[in-house]
Image: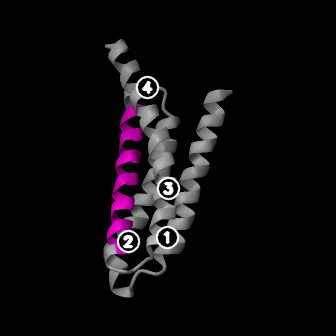
Amino acid sequence: MYKERYHNRLKKLIEEYITIGYSVVKKFPLDEKYGMTSQVKRAMISIMLNYVEGFARSKKKVMLNFYEISYGSLQESITIFYFATKFLFITTTEYMQLYKIKEEIAKMLWSSIEGLRKDCEVDM
């Protein structure tokens, strides 16, 4: 039951991050369509897709791999939003809203990653 609530909470946070992120990306200039806009959209969707695919796996090492990719995509996306703030595409307030959600997702994902790493060490 706890695992299911945890999983659902994490998915909802990722969904919120993607939803807000997609709305913020609309402010990026048109000449970034094939640059930062495309890259950040792929990274945001990758967070969810890799998390869900990892969660669906039964082998812990495979699950760990997908969670690590999800975590990496999360870091990639927030870095793009950081530069979007620097380039004045989005406001600092918008960035901080995304950053706050990102931090919560990162803590949950990292906790899952660390737990799986410990489990994988035991399995060896």
Tag nearer the camera, 2 or 4:
4
Callout 1 environment at 10 Å: few (<14), some (14 to 19), or many (20+)? some
Tag nearer the camera, 4 or 3:
3
- SS category of the residue bearing label 2: helix
Q: Amino acid at mark 3?
A: Lys
The correct choice, above or below, for 91 with respect to 66 in the image is: below
Residue located 38% across and 67% down the image: 81
- SS category of the residue bearing label 4: helix
Residue situated furthest right in the rendering: 1
For this rendering, which residue is in front, 124 or 117? 117
Cβ atoms at labels 2 and 3 below 8 Å apart: no
Q: Amino acid at mark 4?
A: Gly
**Residue 100 shows which numbered tag?**
3
* Residue for badge 2: 38
Q: Amino acid at mark 2?
A: Ser
Distance from label 2 to label 3 (Cα)? 22 Å
* Residue for badge 1: 94
> For the magenta stretch, what is the residue range?
63-85
Residue located 36% across and 13% down the image: 122
N-terminal of the pair, mark 1 or mark 3, is 1
Q: Magenta span has 73? A: yes
The quadrant of the picture occupied by the C terminus is top left
Q: Position of residue 54 (x, y in %)?
A: 46, 38
For this rendering, which residue is in front, 73 or 50? 73
Distance from label 1 to label 3 (Cα)? 10 Å
Q: Amino acid at mark 1?
A: Glu
Tag nearer the camera, 4 or 1:
1
**Residue 115 shows which numbered tag?**
4
Distance from label 2 to label 4 (Cα)? 33 Å
Cβ atoms at labels 4 and 1 below 8 Å apart: no
The correct choice, above or below, for 82 with respect to 53 in the image is: below
